[in-house]
Image (cartoon, rainbow, N blue to C red):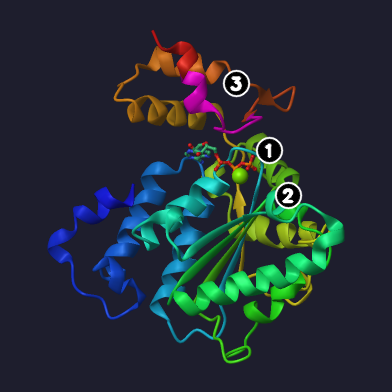
Amino acid sequence: MAGSCKASFTSLCVVSVSFFLKYQFSTDVVMRCLAKDLQTKLHGQHLVQSVVLKAIQGFVNHPESNKPLTLSFHGWSGTGKNFVARIIAENLYRDGVKSECVRLFIAPFHFPHARLVDTYKGQLREAIRDMVLRCPQTLFIFDEAEKLHPGFIDAIKPYMDHYDNVDGVTYRRAIFLFLSNIGGAAINDVALDFWHSGQNREDIGMEDLEHRLRAETMDSQGGFAQSELMSGHLIDFFVPFLPLEYRHVKLCARDAYAARGIDADETTLDEVAKAMLYVPKEERLFSAQGCKSIPQRINFFLP
Ligand SMILES: Nc1ncnc2c1ncn2[C@@H]1O[C@H](COP(=O)(O)OP(=O)(O)OP(=O)(O)O)[C@@H](O)[C@H]1O
Ligand SMILES: [Mg+2]
């Protein structure tokens, strides 16, 4: 994914003095590629495009920053949370999510049992510490964060705080992403209100959502919402993923066909998009599963 973008900048390649040394690409090229990927591959998420880019760009360009970057992605299923995490990884690391400096934790998979929380805490601290010692720049992704056990994530709160180092190890060059569906309904309500009042979806601003999202999260139950990361204001940005509409589903279908070398026509794209379920019942505006399973669904429509 990122390879093709960076390849087009080969002539601009310089040996970077930053942590991008291993890619031989300057941070400027990396950021331009990240911006391009967010613009062209991600559909219907104008807030995500601008917030994620600004947050990562600011962080990367200010290596003296006194805390790690912590972003919390919120939204309904299939709206692109994991997709964006992957785009970030693929742009920051040559091997993308497979890089030894990127780690994905899936809450119910890696930390399933409440009774083992204390053991998991030690394991998580150690895993993060080891990676930070090995890599100049790390990316940690916590998927399904709403399912983290109470108290668990507090184990790494000191790593995310404003400390120069913890026990001699500095965590300031880490990026933490938390992915959850917390506040998804509130995001959808705002998008629906805009639609009802005849306003453009693209006019929804962070000011319409961020405070509400923060409040919704604080009011939610669960180990992430009730963690010290929240009460200690250690989340730098709450990133809202809007529910996807029919036209976005069509774009996802177009991409899925293109990935198989097929230039699908409008009729075919309409067929795929029409086969999805749209909610709420009256407006039938938002795809209930976003763009999830579109690559699988197009099999059904292939000749
Ligand atoms: N906004 C989007 N633009 C383009 N493609 C998208 C978008 N949202 C989802 N997709 C496509 O759908 C797939 C599934 O989306 P993704 O896994 O990112 O959803 P999610 O938000 O993490 O959902 P969940 O909460 O169910 O985990 C992606 O791999 C991508 O192909
Ligand atoms: Mg996901």
Image-quadrant location for residue 228: bottom right
Query: Which residue is outermost to the left?
Result: 11
Marks 1 and 2, how far apart at CA: 31 Å
Is 274 drawn above or below residue 111 in the view shown? above
| Label 3 secondary element | loop
> x%, y% of residue 296?
50, 24
Query: Which residue is outermost to the top?
Result: 303
Other residues around mark 1 within 10 Å, as few (<14) / some (14–19) / many (≥20)? some
Q: Mark 2 points at which residue?
A: 108
Residue stretch rendered in magenta on the structure: 287-298
Q: Can residue 256 be seen in this view?
A: yes
Q: Is residue 221 visible?
A: no
| Residue kind at label 2, given as amino acid type | Pro
**Mark closer to the observer (3, 1):** 3
| Residue kind at label 1, given as amino acid type | Leu
| Residue kind at label 3, given as amino acid type | Met
Circles 3 and 2, Cβ within 8 Å, touching? The answer is no
Any mark on residue 276, and which? Answer: 3
Q: Name the residue under label 1.
A: 192
> x%, y% of residue 180?
68, 51
> In the rendered structure, which disc, 3 or 1, sits on the residue that comes first in sequence?
1
Is 35 drawn above or below residue 69 in the view shown? above
> In the rendered structure, which disc, 1 or 2, sits on the residue that comes first in sequence?
2
| Label 1 secondary element | helix
